[in-house]
Image (cartoon, grey):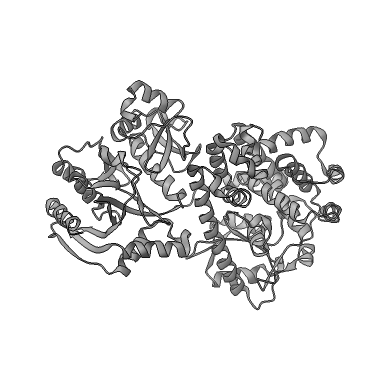
Amino acid sequence: MIVADLSAGELRRRLTGPGLRIRVGPVAAEIRSSFDAVQAGLALHYAAHDVLTAGDFADFRVSVERPLGVRRWFAPQALFRFDGNSMFTPLPAAQAFPLLEWGLNWCVSTHCHQYIVIHAAVLERNGRALLLPAPPGSGKSTLCAALVARGWRLLSDELALVELTGRRIVPFPRPISLKNRSIDTVARFWPDAAIGAVVPDTLKGSVAHVRPPVDSVRRGDEAATPGWVVLPRYESGATTRISELSKAEAFMRLVESAFNYDIHGRAGFEALAELVDASACHAFTYGGALDEAVGMFDRFAQAA
Amino acid sequence: MKRVPSRLLAHALREPQRLVEERDAWEALIRHGREADLLGTLAFRLDACAGLAQVPAAPRAHLIAAQNQCRAQQAAVRRETAEIARALHGRGVPVVLLKGAAYLLAGLPPARGRLFSDIDILVPKARLPEVESALMLAGFATTHLHPYDQRYYRRWMHELPPMQHVKRLTLLDVHHTIVPETAGVRLDAGALFRGAVPLADAPGFHVLSPLDMVLHSATHLFHNEEMTHGLRDLVDLDALLTHFGDRPFWPALVARAGELDLGRPLYYALRFTSRMLGTAVPGDVLADVERYAPPAPVRVVMDRLLEAALQPASAQPATRWARRALYLRGHWLKMPVPLLAWHLTAKALRREEPA
């Protein structure tokens, strides 16, 4: 059973009662919330995700709740809880769904130390993974959405889960998070994209999410072997260009983007070194021309 | 295994081999273990008795993650203690490692799988200024910059305000005794140093004698207002008592508790390790330590409160309330009432400093 099989009433009953259990790649989450925006966000973005039963193992039990207190009557807030404990300061209620997304990222990046967890988008063509590690503002998610629009499989928009044994990259297929102007850019480039509600005035500006393709979700247990490490940089009006990146620099960029490199010691060093060795490494600059950008990545995939 | 959900974790730590048969309990167990900071301990105990391969894949991933985290933290504690040794080297200050760092560097059983939040050291009170400046030169800076907090620690507590390394962000607590000065416990800190044992593998460092180590662990748990790590501290105590507890150890422990005025925390330690974790405390010792028990009505209340507070908070609703009550008790033990009133007023009236 998938989330889309649940009626609106049943989805609400689970979210406000025993919890909705879904599988996202290697992770099973139990989610509770009484916010309409969270229900709508889950119904849209997680439509194709498997629903689990109460007997299936859930890795993380999370909720987005209305904190008690008088504020709920004039400036309502949303609070993320993990195992019943609140983890972040509450946000305005309008940000309830993005808060769930950020919370789920946090769950994985602070607990899943069976992987090296890297802040990066991951896509796949012909079984080979394209890693886009990048700081915010580099246009990583825009590029990621554009590649998904043209048939690259989405493994993750946010977190690359690198296995220590086997050196594969494990999918974590969830909505792609877009910010500010990139929301319109992607809507124009990918008219069929299922884009959720735009939430203004978050810490990151306006935020909207794009639903992951059904195929990406269905293949959430299919890991990919390293193919490319590409460091994207968005520069308004720049021409699309690509250059070689030394293996050493690619390695250091992965380390900088990793949440838990320090935990893995020598095993982590060796896993990332092998990943970089097995990948073609590039630096990539682009302006607005997404068509050109995607074309360049498609040529990579054909050459490989 | 008896199916009391709130006791799941305690049972699992006692008899990890039975978990392999108990397949539907894993989700709650992982959640409780994570919350109590005991996943690492559980992982190493399971690995030692049945092997992690026996554990179903989903919970096993969490245990492996905890083992990885634990190895990294232990390596970090070793590196950090070496830095501290370098900072204090050649001054002739006796430095005693406490709690986690002590268990790790002395190779004692509680270290297996243990997670760390900070490093604790004990130095003589007269040497504090010198130790603090040496640590500052090595990059450790004081935290809690509000003048009231600084005064609170320096005048009334058993430790300096926590220090943090400016680059590595490691937290370091520098103690000069093991109970707050305001707590009214007649404890001679000099006696702790006289009994301390030098560490062969870590020159410059000592650990407390086995008796004092157990008593400090007990005091830390049962004389404290903060119970969030209660079960982990109880697991430390269980491992220490099991390791040291030969025949001559027990009467010596009770006698030493009397000398250091720490009878009450020892009473609680033996009562709750044996009740909750099945620690093999001899019956005559349990009976003997009863003389340090509180009066009967208090005992009934404390039994209920501690039993609830030592569970993971998500296991039963009473835990949060019990911890709140013990938080108040902890403050009550920490300082006399007029001082407590002054302390709470000062904290309540103070304006938050700008971030």
Position of residue B235 measured from the top left corner of the image (x, y, whole percent): 67, 48
Residue at the spot 21% in from the left edge and 51% down from the top edge: A143
Q: Is residue A210 visible?
A: no
Image position of A132 (left or right of B345): left
Q: Nearer the viewer, residue A91 or A62?
A: A62
Residue at the spot 62% in from the left edge and 56% down from the top edge: B112
Q: Quadrant of residue B118?
A: bottom right
Position of residue B86 measured from the top left corner of the image (x, y, whole percent): 59, 74
Residue at the spot 81% in from the left edge and 49% down from the top edge: B263
Image position of A91 (left or right of A147): right
User: On the rendered image, what quadrant is the N terminus of chain B found in?
Assistant: top right
Q: Nearer the viewer, residue B74 or A169?
A: A169
Image position of A71 (left or right of B316): left
Q: Is residue A30 above or below residue B210?
A: above
Q: Quadrant of residue A180?
A: top left
Position of residue B70 measured from the top left corner of the image (x, y, whole percent): 55, 56
Image position of A7 (left or right of B39): left
Q: Nearer the viewer, residue B314 or B110?
A: B110
Q: Is residue A138 visible?
A: yes
- The total number of labels drawn is 0
In this view, which residue lies farthest toward the top?
Answer: A9
Position of residue A246 measured from the top left corner of the image (x, y, whole percent): 27, 69
